[in-house]
Image (spheres, helix red, strand yellow):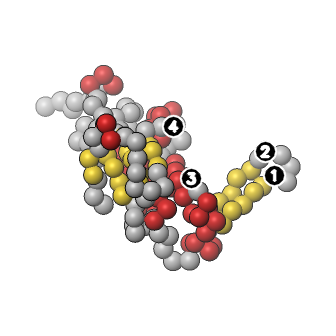
Amino acid sequence: MSTTMPKVAEITRKWYIIDAADKPLGRTAAKAAMILRGKHKPDFAPHVDCGDHVIIINAEKAILTGKKLEQKVYYHHSGWIGGLKEKKYRLLMQENPEKAMMLAVKGMIPDTVIGRTALTRCRVYRGAEHKHAAQKPQAWTL
């Protein structure tokens, strides 16, 4: 019996919705990254982009365990001398929880062409409403 290799034309992409309310941010991001890469499918291959679409709702209600809310810091650099900027996760979760969730998912996706393409299929929303009802997303339970 030979191993079947998935082909790009044969891949069917489904839509899944993940509710992040009262769930740890990292665990939610890990499940989203797994779905985006397609690792939940039996015909997964690392060299083929066979993942599905993910909608994460209630990002503002995701929790950070331990002292991460006070101690964890998001750093980014402008590219100029002295351009290192930092923001505590307490502020980041208050101002832009969608970005915090997207950064967590991005950290769990490989930094390759396939990974960047997979990240475009991730949509994060602050509240419970989203605009993808026409795609008929299925609920993904953690």
Q: Residue at x 45, y 56 (%)?
A: 127
Mark 4 residue element:
helix
Q: Residue furthest top?
A: 9
Foreground label between 3 and 4: 3
Tell which of 104 and 90 is nearer to you.
Answer: 90
Q: Is residue 111 left or right of residue 53?
A: right
| Residue bearing mark 2 | 79
| Residue bearing mark 4 | 116
**N-term mark: 3 or 1:** 1
The amino acid at mark 3 is Lys
Quadrant of image for the N terminus: top left
Disc 3 crowd, CA 10 A, few/some/many (<14, 14-19, 20+): some
**N-term mark: 3 or 4:** 3
Q: Residue at x 58, y 72 (%)?
A: 69
| Residue bearing mark 3 | 99
Asked if marks 1 and 4 touch (Cβ < 8 Å), the reply is no
The amino acid at mark 2 is Gly
Asked if marks 2 and 1 touch (Cβ < 8 Å), the reply is yes
Q: Is residue 74 left or right of residue 122?
A: right
| Residue bearing mark 1 | 83
Dividing the picture into quadrants, the one containing residue 84 is bottom right
Residue 54 image position (x, y, % from top left): 38, 45
